[in-house]
Amino acid sequence: MAIKKLWDKGYSLDEEVEEFTVGDDYLLDMKLVKYDCLASIAHAKMLGRIGILKKDEVDRLVKELNRIIKLWEDGKFNISKHEEDVHTAIENMLTDRLGQLGKKIHTGRSRNDQVLTALRLYQKENLKSCMYLAEQYIESAGNFSTTYGKIELPGYTHTRKAMPSSIKMWAEAFIDSMNDNVSLLESAYLLVDQSPLGTAAGYGSPLKLNREYTAEEMGFAKVQENPIYAQMSRGKFEATILHSLSQVMFDINKMATDLILFSMPEFGYFELPDKFTTGSSIMPNKKNPDVLELLRAKYHVVVSYEMQIKSLSSNLPTGYNRDIQLTKWPVMDGFEITQRSLKLASHLLDNLKVNKANCKKGLTGDVYATHLAYELVKKGMPFRDAYKEIAKKYMGKG
Amino acid sequence: MAIKKLWDKGYSLDEEVEEFTVGDDYLLDMKLVKYDCLASIAHAKMLGRIGILKKDEVDRLVKELNRIIKLWEDGKFNISKHEEDVHTAIENMLTDRLGQLGKKIHTGRSRNDQVLTALRLYQKENLKSCMYLAEQYIESAGNFSTTYGKIELPGYTHTRKAMPSSIKMWAEAFIDSMNDNVSLLESAYLLVDQSPLGTAAGYGSPLKLNREYTAEEMGFAKVQENPIYAQMSRGKFEATILHSLSQVMFDINKMATDLILFSMPEFGYFELPDKFTTGSSIMPNKKNPDVLELLRAKYHVVVSYEMQIKSLSSNLPTGYNRDIQLTKWPVMDGFEITQRSLKLASHLLDNLKVNKANCKKGLTGDVYATHLAYELVKKGMPFRDAYKEIAKKYMGKG
Amino acid sequence: MAIKKLWDKGYSLDEEVEEFTVGDDYLLDMKLVKYDCLASIAHAKMLGRIGILKKDEVDRLVKELNRIIKLWEDGKFNISKHEEDVHTAIENMLTDRLGQLGKKIHTGRSRNDQVLTALRLYQKENLKSCMYLAEQYIESAGNFSTTYGKIELPGYTHTRKAMPSSIKMWAEAFIDSMNDNVSLLESAYLLVDQSPLGTAAGYGSPLKLNREYTAEEMGFAKVQENPIYAQMSRGKFEATILHSLSQVMFDINKMATDLILFSMPEFGYFELPDKFTTGSSIMPNKKNPDVLELLRAKYHVVVSYEMQIKSLSSNLPTGYNRDIQLTKWPVMDGFEITQRSLKLASHLLDNLKVNKANCKKGLTGDVYATHLAYELVKKGMPFRDAYKEIAKKYMGKG
Amino acid sequence: MAIKKLWDKGYSLDEEVEEFTVGDDYLLDMKLVKYDCLASIAHAKMLGRIGILKKDEVDRLVKELNRIIKLWEDGKFNISKHEEDVHTAIENMLTDRLGQLGKKIHTGRSRNDQVLTALRLYQKENLKSCMYLAEQYIESAGNFSTTYGKIELPGYTHTRKAMPSSIKMWAEAFIDSMNDNVSLLESAYLLVDQSPLGTAAGYGSPLKLNREYTAEEMGFAKVQENPIYAQMSRGKFEATILHSLSQVMFDINKMATDLILFSMPEFGYFELPDKFTTGSSIMPNKKNPDVLELLRAKYHVVVSYEMQIKSLSSNLPTGYNRDIQLTKWPVMDGFEITQRSLKLASHLLDNLKVNKANCKKGLTGDVYATHLAYELVKKGMPFRDAYKEIAKKYMGKG
């Protein structure tokens, strides 16, 4: 059995513990190389300012860190499993190339505030990317509304025809909702936009660091003063990020659900281009909306990530706990899912068609029952009586 | 504001803490009166056997406990908030009526094993009730299949017509699934069917109790020997109970989803009697399947209860932690939801109708595409080629 | 068995369905009476403005609605199970007392937008209450810091002594975090602060309603224009409310975890007054921090509510679905838990003591290892070398 | 920004949809190669038996499929992204090497029952592996108990010293609990041990397949008769698997929590060997139990997987929905986490030490208060009075 093979090779215990604790962190950390370098650049400059590094030392560190960013952008920087994480890998490269100087970069900081800082920079950029993609989705929905908005179709409640609706009303619901989602993304951004650099292991540093300087250098709106809060906010801020992403995904879940239902040939209000549908291995007749089903399903992945973080960071005392390392993957994958889904949802809207004839066919008489009741109201009948009058027409009908 | 009023009345702190810690426990505990008495009866008899109580004392305790059960069955036993929980209320009544003797009943046990025992007895009875109701649901689905089974209708995949199905196939899917659910309920029952009485506060008792005797007396299959495990299993066993309930509710969720969709007039395969549907306050035309929507929704409540228990009991050391008190409500409400839902789902099946004409109308030509391909296979064509041959017919069609 | 009795009495099906669909809604709705009346007052005035009601009619409706608010505040307004919900109960009373006029109040609205409006008003007031209680908690933490802030104690990482910390640093972490929570509550408030009244059943009303007027009358910051979005935001907005509440509860969970741990006699840094602790039924020696354990546990209830809402509102098409009715309880109970917990946490902080002697005893030499390393750094040694130098002292020690 | 680059390269839409729908499935499917081949071998033999394939054809298919299994075991079988999944990759290789014959293997089955079958075989083997590792853990805990069992130490309730406990009692709690977990794994195994092969796309096959034969050939205990149930059980069975895994992880979570707490130098009951602890980048004094913290945290990942599956498979009609594809990763990763954690927990137990002196020191007088009360009980005092008598000694003490 595969698993047994893996474990039965007689690894010494040290190796097993190492294997378990490193996990895939060294891979996930590949996403953080640039951000860790940017934070190190700010830190090095600050160490220069407060007299711990010489100007020349700062310059050499900054130059080397920029070189690493470049390497990474070119896909040439790797983190080996043995190095454990991005911070070690970068410090190793600095020491390899700059000798003693490389060892000095860690003065006045801990891996705890270092990873927190890199993650924040990463999160800020990805929240911005989500906002940008949300705006594109809004644009696509707007275009869709411009093209098809005037078409009327039945509005449903309880999955039953209710009253007349329109494509415009439908598309604008998603536009308004996504605009509110952008506000939630902004709230998350504001929360995250505080610099933890200088909080060290979670109880501050005996050195007098200039935390305002590094914060400004990295583009943070403010300093997160309290070191215990800095550690406490790891996991916590991630929960708010994932909540905001979940709300974006909620809209996509709902739009996908509508489109799966109302593009059924039995309704035919919406039409997906053939190239958006997939076939079956056994049924030659099938054109399946797999892409919509997966968009619908991805919402649940993001929600489960939020729960995971909320659960694993609970019942723990203040101060860094290694448990919190597991929040990296949910946030990173949460961002990727949301960004891909937004992009794809926009493309769907760009290609989606409305079948006017089917919409019209759907507007059967019962959809106008409320309007008829209001005609009676306009003639002076109290609403409840008008309602009962019209309701008689629908007695005994399915 | 309502809430502020509640808190601003200047309660002394003691009262606030008491209020908070008691919570609604004294109300929930009303469900446990009988079970706590049954456990106390077994405990009293055992104390007699090991010589701590005299025969006469045992008899008086047993008589009084049976009287309390009777009172409870007649709705005449109450637990006041001040008494905090069922155990105190019963002990108080025993002491009121039996004097010194009432104080002796707690010998050799703790509230920790006492509540555990009462809960287990309660859970066993409720798991049995769920199994019974699941069998009734299976019977209703069987009757439904007998009445309508031969009717053919389209089977869907990806919410798109796929191949011919039948009411028989549909109903039997739910029968087979519910049978497997019953196995899960039985697994939960087996797990719970071990007596914790005698584990005291979670580290055993200095007295030599006869735990086999009380276990047998209460109808437990075995003794849960280890006191630390007894405490550790609180919350843990509840998670398995709720998982088994969630699987029952999953089937009901799925059946409700099918019925909501396929009783839409646009399909009309299924028909809900009028008296199962509700109206709208504004739209005189509406007949809404609220009951199905609520059945669908209740699944999520049960799942969230399971999660709640799994989350709140984590990251805690062994030994009783008060956190675990909060598992009472999720389990009790989880049982009630599942039992009501099963009952209602059975009634639905007893009243549900199939519209044969609509089913037939739904069986459009494309549903038979796979069958056509297999006709070619029978003539010797490899399946992949037959598939492509038939697929040509559906090119470019929605 | 209790459950079977309930169901086996041969209720006719109608009653069972009614029982199931109404559920406890009529009880929960008791919290909404005032808000529903306030919304009805605004609606009545608006109907007057657009000429559907006469001035005199408006006056009578407003007067009667204010009378109902008064009744409710005096605990004299009830909703019977038969009436199903607050809206029906109020409309019934209006009709009883005002005859035909009572029937007119529902003109131009649906229960869908009516309940949405009442819920929003309720949510706004409760979010404000949470913010107020959060401020009080911040004040209590501030006082605590003023009293004990200068006391030093060990800071822990990985639940192991790490570096010196202080009560001030500890208390201010919770202050800063709660301040950020208030921002999240405000985000939720902003989201909710849009008036859905006039969106009717979710597809607008054929009448020309003055939605800006009612919004302003009720104190909403703006109109939620799109009727489909109004419905779609039910469940969705609740998820954001519960997320914000969960973040408040997260801090309380963490503070409680710290206090449970560090008030153990083995540490003794913090001391709970006796009257905050509870005893054991079997162990005469016990003083248990039940109140802290329950505060810790309540977090998980709120998180599970958020999940429940996020799960049950998913995979559903646009337009009202009855499933969403189940979001009432989680939000209402979520508010109550959070408000009570905040209040209690403040009281705890007001009564909590710090044991200076124990804190000092905890500050063993190893806590200063990092400081020693920095002494070497100040003398010019690269940090990595200083680290290794000091680390030698701790080799082989637990 | 990284993400934008990914999406801005102007992929044609087809490619984006393909990219999104395939996802990482082609990588996950690498775990299924052997199982899909085994199922195909059984299917081919059955097609021979019912006369659709000739004996010679069957032999060639079986030989080729065994060759693929061998390739996979040697790490030489790959699935390209373009091939989408394991089924396509294997069918392609068959067709490449066997021509027309390769196309015939898909006769009478669909990817829907094919993937279900491969997953079941994979799940059965992994559940067995979990049971095996659970037994090893039980053995390690047994050895630990043999070595240290007699040592007494304080038992805690409410994280407060309560009564005397022992290493034996502690270790055996985990043994008993893991034994019950094995029963849950067995329940999951029994559930999964039914063959879906032959249910085709979810509505059966027009061909008369011999399902008993394939079931037996693959080692399934029985045939899962109903095709709709076969599809419905995807996601559902996975939920039960993950629940059983979560219960294993719960125990590990609890054991880790105990060990993190009681290996703190402040207690020192347990001792982790140095090579199991990790250091800090800034604090030279630290030996951190990272491995225990990660074991503790992994529980939450498994629980979130269970939730994800339970949420994403809800509110969906019967018949295959593509959403369900997303259940692959949670199950596969859930297995891997559980297996690794069990293995590591066993190793921990093999290396964990108990510090007898510290345990003894922990057994302070108050731990024996209950015993003292029972001494009085033995002399005839009612328990409640004895309790009060002893309690006096602890008044006013922390």
Image: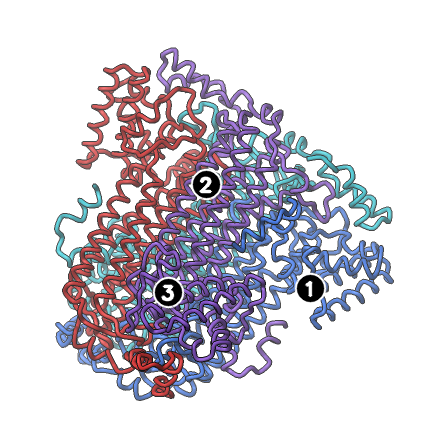
Chain colours: A cyan, B purple, C blue, D red
Relative image position of residue B346 (x, y in whole percent): 55, 41
Q: Which residue is mark 2?
A: B178
Type of amino acid at the residue the image marks with label 2: Met
**CA distance separating discs 3 and 1:** 41 Å
Residue at horizontal 25%, vertical 17%? D57
When asked about the image quadrant of residue D251, the answer is bottom left
Q: Is residue B388 left or right of residue C184?
A: left
Residue at horizontal 27%, vertical 28%? D217
Residue at horizontal 25%, vertical 68%? A58
Q: Which chain hosts label 2?
A: B
Type of amino acid at the residue the image marks with label 1: Val
Q: Which residue is mark 1?
A: C33
Q: Which chain hosts label 3?
A: A
Label 3 SS: helix
Relative image position of residue D241 (x, y in whole percent): 35, 46
Image quarter (top left, top right, bottom left or bottom right) of the C terminus of chain C: bottom left
